[in-house]
Amino acid sequence: MHAGFPLSAAHIRGRGMIQVLRHYGYPFLFLVVLAESLGLPVPGFPFILVSAALSAELHFRLGGVVALSALAAFAGDSFLYFLGRRRGRSILRKLCALSLNPASCVSRTEDFFERNGLKTLLVGKFIPGLNTVSPPLAGMLKAAFSRFALFDLGGIGLWVMSAVLLGLGFRTQVEWLIEWLAAFGRTSVLILAVLLAGWLLLKTIDRRRFFHLLERSRISPQTLKERLDRGENLVVVDLRSDLAYRLEGLKVRGAIHIPPGEFKLRYREIPEGRPVVMYCTCPNEATSARMALLLMSKGYNEVWPLRGGLDAWRDLGYPTETYRAEEGPPTTVSAASPSVSV
């Protein structure tokens, strides 16, 4: 597209991002931003920033960068909105499973929506994890598309313009950084790649260690059902956010509901000296595992996350009861019969 633009060999060396943008132009910028909006690990913000900072060299128009980036982001967000509206929590779990911190991905998004509603979309693009999960959660909550579009476009506008203004404001620094990378050539790329690989490796090892411990400490839905049927005096704790709790309308029979954000203040509602089973609806039961470790540090001896969480329990047809919002969250353990069971 811009193959005739003159660059010396010294400039070309080590300037991968610039060369890709220069040769493939607006379509590549559109695809990068779209990919990030769909949850892929692609750095859309830096590409917009560099496109604005080096717009003259790249033969880009700032208006085109803004419009194309906003269109790509909105297209990706709209796709996830309708996917969330149709598929519900399953798409939320799949998107969060891609995160290095899936528990934080789920709970943080639901907490934001609990406090701010669709206004979450205004800041969602600036927060890793939240940027991808907010649109399907809005769809899952059956928000009107017109209202979703209004807030989402507002957030996209802030995000895109932030990248553009930073690019224009720090144009000299961006050019210096590109020249520095070019001067060191492959060595700079190798250093950055090693640092990134090392960070990802540490995160991966940490996750594997965490999930290895989790796998050994979980209890299956079948085992929990058998123990409850035998009349064992277990405590079941529901760790979903208030938003998820009200939205789904079901819980395991007799479970206490304590949102993760309130757990440190309310954990004493869980009777001591009794086995405790915790469940959530986040990927890999990560929230349940974190709260189980916290509870054990407080002196509780037998604590297990429920393998598969509420979804696995419900899929097996085990007893649940409805939750009515006007009743308020339950705060005591009860063996009473449920109002409705499935």
Image (cartoon, rainbow, N blue to C red):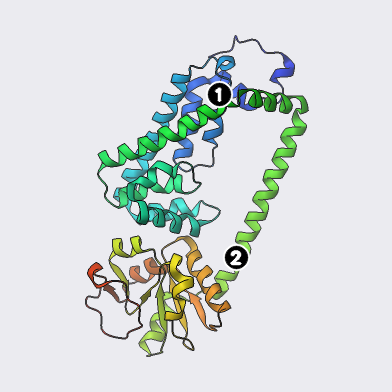
- Name the quadrant containing residue 145: top left
Residue neighbourhood size for the residue with mark 2, other residues' Cα within 10 Å, grouped as few (<14), some (14–19), many (≥20): some
Earlier in the chain: of badge 2 and badge 1, it is 1
Specify the quadrant that holds the C terminus: bottom left
Which residue shows up at 43% across the image and 34% down it? 158
- Give the residue pinned by disc 1: 168
Q: Tell which of 323 and 226 is nearer to you.
A: 323
Residue 188 placement: quadrant: top right
- In the picture provided, is 90 more to the left or to the right than 189? left
Q: Position of residue 225 (x, y in %)?
A: 38, 81
Instruction: Indicate which disc residue 210 carries.
Output: 2
Q: Is residue 14 left or right of residue 307?
A: right
Is residue 254 toward the left or the right of residue 34 in the image?
Answer: left
* Residue at (70, 40) in percent of width and height: 193
Q: Tell me what residue is drawn at x 71 percent, y 23 percent.
A: 179
**In front: mark 2 or mark 1?**
1
Please report contact status of discs 2 and 1: CB closer than 8 Å, yes or no: no
Q: Amino acid at mark 1?
A: Leu
- Nearest the eye: 295 or 94: 295
Q: Is residue 132 above or below residue 44?
A: below
Nearer to us in this view, 323 or 163: 163
The 10 Å Cα crowd at callout 1, few under 14, some 14 to 19, many 20 or more, is many
Query: In what element is the residue under mark 2?
Result: helix
Residue at horizontal 52 percent and vertical 52 percent from the top: 99
Residue 76 image offset from top left, x and y in percent: 40, 37
Residue 106 in the image, given as x and y percentages of width and height: 44, 57
Q: Which residue type does callout 2 highlight?
A: Phe
Q: Is residue 132 above or below residue 28?
A: below
Could you tell me which secondary element the residue under label 1 belongs to? helix
Q: Is residue 132 above or below residue 277?
A: above
- Cα separation, mark 2 vs mark 1, equals 43 Å
Residue 232 at x, y = what percent? 41, 89
